[in-house]
Image (cartoon, helix red, strand yellow):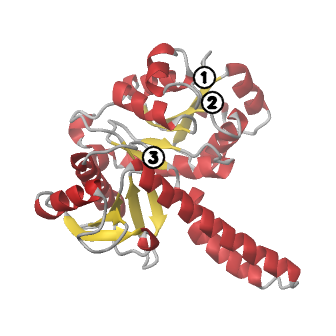
Amino acid sequence: MSKLLKIAIDVMGSDNGPETLIEGAVKALGENEELGVVLFGDGSVINQKLSELEHEADRVEVVPASEVITNYDNPMEAIFRKTDSSLVKALTALAERDDMIGLINAGSTGALLAGSLRYVPAKVLKRPALAAILPAQKGGYTCLVDTGANIDCTASQLVEFAHMGSDFMKEYYGLGNPRVGLLSNGAEETKGNKLVKETHALLKKESGLNFVGNIEGSNALSGDCDVLVADGFAGNQVFKNSEGIARRIITDIVRYAKTNNNPEIMKLVSYLMSIYDFSSLGGGIVLGAGKPIIKARGSANADSIKNTSAMLLNMAKNRDLFYGKDNR
């Protein structure tokens, strides 16, 4: 067997428990022969779950950790204090091991970002941001950044996020000159709060990006831009509202089909799910780290972890494109 490309997976801290992430990791192994996984967390739980699943043992490594960073911990304090936590041990291994290509975590977003900056920083230090990939109405995808990593931002930070998002879309989706939009409460240049107006001026006059102006929340999935920039509070609302509305509409269609005994409508449901199942697009991408890191949602199921692993593997194969040769 050729040398495996190993992904670190912190199995602790998710809403659905470590068993779900372990199952997703094993599913990922079944679809990617070149992949290996290193599972960090409660060793007894991991080994018990693995004993219930059919897998190639030589492609799975278990690293026990006695501590867990939860969403109730102060992220920065926990990164320094809980040194035997699954997340800190995973980040440390990612930084130190050449055979480890990236990391998946479904726990504390704040701790993951703080830990990424501390243990796996890019050579050119950048403030990490969280990006989500959303389906666009006109085809293709839109990179929404930031989606919750940075709640309070400055205009210069939003411009940096725009650059990172633009670079990502160039290399991951092959776009020559990604269109960058700024989330605002109106398309007009005069709309927006103080932060949006300041950012608009910088993006328009100084960024060198293909800035296409303000984008309203109702057009976030329109495809009018390839990168949509926002502070973490507003971006998180756009992401969760888009997903929630899509889920509600699909649920209502399923209910109508059952009530009217019309199974043909389920073809429409399958089509919509293929577009709006956001979990199939992987998790949130940590931009500004020295190696590929993806934040899976706390509610992620096994299939979502499998898909996230595939996305991480693809990113790692193109690491020079995403992170630059100088960040090795």
- Residue 270 locus on image (x, y percent): 68, 74
Residue 63 horizontal side relative to residue 217, left or right:
right
Q: Is residue 174 visible?
A: no
Q: Residues within 10 Å of mark 1 (few under 14, many from 20)?
A: many
Which of 264/299 is in front? 299
Residue 276 horizontal side relative to residue 48, left or right:
left
Q: Residues within 10 Å of mark 2 (few under 14, many from 20)?
A: many
For mark 2, what is the residue? 12
Determine whether 139 is above or below 123 in the image: below
Mark seen at residue 68: 1
Q: CA distance from mark 1 to mark 3?
A: 21 Å
Determine whether 65 is above or below 207 in the image: above
- Residue 62 locus on image (x, y percent): 61, 24
SS for callout 1 = loop
- Residue 209 locus on image (x, y percent): 18, 62
Mark seen at residue 230: none
Which of 206/292 is in front? 206
Question: Which three-letter amino acid code belongs to the residue tagged 2?
Answer: Met
Q: Earlier in the sequence, mark 1 or mark 2?
A: 2
Nearer the observer: mark 3 or 2; the answer is 3
Question: Which three-letter amino acid code belongs to the residue tagged 1?
Answer: Val
Please name the residue shown 49% across and 20% down the image.
78
Mark seen at residue 148: 3
Q: CA distance from mark 1 to mark 2?
A: 7 Å
Q: Are marks 1 and 2 in contact (CB under 8 Å)?
A: yes
Which image quadrant is residue 228 in? Answer: bottom left
- Residue 233 locus on image (x, y percent): 44, 50
Quadrant that contains the C terminus: top left
Q: Earlier in the sequence, mark 1 or mark 3?
A: 1
